[in-house]
Amino acid sequence: MAMVEEDVLPITIPEALDSLTKLIGDVNRKNRTMIDYYIYPKETPSEIEAYRPRLQVLFTRVESLSALDLPKLTLLVDDAAAFMSAFLLPIIDQLLNAVHGVQQIFINHYDRDLEDRKPYNGVYTTLEYRERQLKKFQADQMRNPQRRLPESLTPMPPNPTEPSFCRFAIAYMNHRDHGKLSQVMSEELSSDDKEKLRNSGGAYLSWDCPGCAFKLKYHVVSSMTSNIQLTDDVRSHSSVPEIEYRPAWLVKCHLYQPKSKNVKYSPAWDDRRESATDSRRGGTVRRQSDTRSHRTSNPFFFGGPRRSQSEVITNKYTTTHIRSKETYAKYGCPFCFVTGREHGHMDYRNGRELAEHIAARHHLGKPPSSLVLEKYMVGLNGRCADNVRRWDLNVR
Ligand SMILES: [Zn+2]
Ligand SMILES: [Zn+2]
C-alpha cells in the first residue's frame, strides 16, 4: 500500500528560519508571562531559569544559519538546502523538548489546570507543523531530478572578472578528490622542507589539481597517512598562532589558477621565507582594515599585482616590498563567501594570508555556522562536529 504523502504547505528555508526566530521569541515571552503570573516576586527556580540559556543557544544557532546566503552555499555544498534543513530539524526538536519540559514544570508544581489549558499549545503545534514541512522539503530536495553537483555550477574556466573557487576545490570539499599525485623535485623543496626530510624522513608529494594549475606539496611519513586527507602534515605560522591547518584545507580554498601561469608552490609551506618577511615588518601583523577598502575595489583577478603602488605607500603596516612571485590570488575565504561577503575575501596569496584573515574575522568569538564548520572540517579548540573525524583547519 502506497504511503499517502502528508498534506503540508510548502516552506522555503528563509521562511523556516524567520518562523523559528519568531517562535523562539514567543517561547521566551510565554516563559516570562508564566513566571510573572505564578512565581514573581519569588525567585525563579533554577530548573525554569535554565531554559533561558538553552533558548539563547538555539537562537544563536538559528541566527548563524540565517547569516548564510543560500544561493552562495548552493555553489559550494552538496544539496545545500537539504543540508540546511538537516541543521534546522534538530533545533526544532530541541525547541519542542524545551516547550514540553517547561510546560510540564508549571503543570506539576504550580497549576494542575494547565494540563487542560496547555498554555504553550500554540507554539507547540506550530513547531510540529514546521517540522513536518521541513521534512517534506528535505525529501523533495533529495528527489529533485534537477539536482546538480555544486562543482558543475561553476563554469570552467570561471568568469575572469571575479575570482572563484576552483571546481575541484569544491568537489574535494564534498569528498570527491580528483587530485593527481606527482613527485616534488628537489629544486622545489625549500630548506625547511629538506630539513624536515632529514629529521623525520618520508617524502614530499604534490597534489595537483586536474582542472587548473594549482598544486600543493605535502609531507608524508607513513603508508597509512600518505593520502592528502590523512597526512599528519600540520602547518601553522608564527604570526598567527591561533590557526593551524592541514594541506587539505588549502585544497578546499584554492581559486582557479589559469594553467598558463608559471605556478610556484605556495610560500605558506616555506616557514623560513615567511619568518624573514615577518621580521622585516618589525613583527607587526598587518591589520585587516588597512587593505580592505582597496581590496574591495581591486579589479585584478589573476594577473595584476594585488596591491597598487599607492597602497604600499599609504599603508604603514605593509611597507615591505611586493613579492614578484605569488602576486595573484590563490585562496579565497569560504566562510565569507557563504555569507555573501566574498568581495575582498578572495585574494589571499598564500596559506599565511588566509590564516591571518581567519584569525581576524572568524576567530573563536565569532565562528562560522556549525553547518560550515562541519562541511569544511573545522575544529574549534580541536573540537569538531560529532561526525567529523578530524579537523583540516583548527581555530584556537
Ligand atoms: Zn583547481
Ligand atoms: Zn572570511
Image (cartoon, helix red, strand yellow):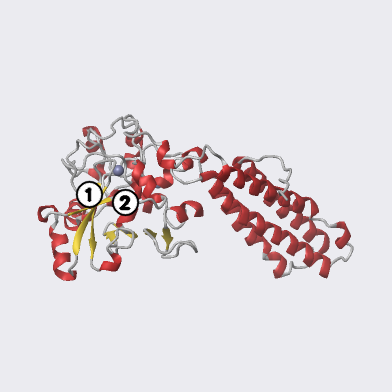
> Which amino acid does the dot numbered 2 rest on?
Leu
Quadrant position of residue 14:
top right
Q: Secondary structure at mark 2?
A: helix
Q: Earlier in the sequence, mark 1 or mark 2?
A: 2
Q: Which residue is mark 2?
A: 250
Q: Nearer the viewer, residue 293 or 6?
A: 6
Q: Quadrant of residue 343?
A: top left
22 or 263, which is in the foreground?
Answer: 263
Where is residue 321? Give x, y as percent. Answer: 17, 42
Quadrant of picture, ligand 1: top left
Residue at the disc numbered 1: 266
Residue beneath the point at 37% across and 54% down: 359
Q: Position of residue 269 (x, y in %)?
A: 22, 55
Q: Amino acid at mark 1?
A: Ser
Answer yes or no: do the residues labelled 1 and 2 have beta carbons within 8 Å?
A: yes
The image quadrant that residue 312 belongs to is top left
What residue sits 46% from the left and 46% below the top?
A: 77
Question: Residue 72 location in percent, x, y?
Answer: 47, 39
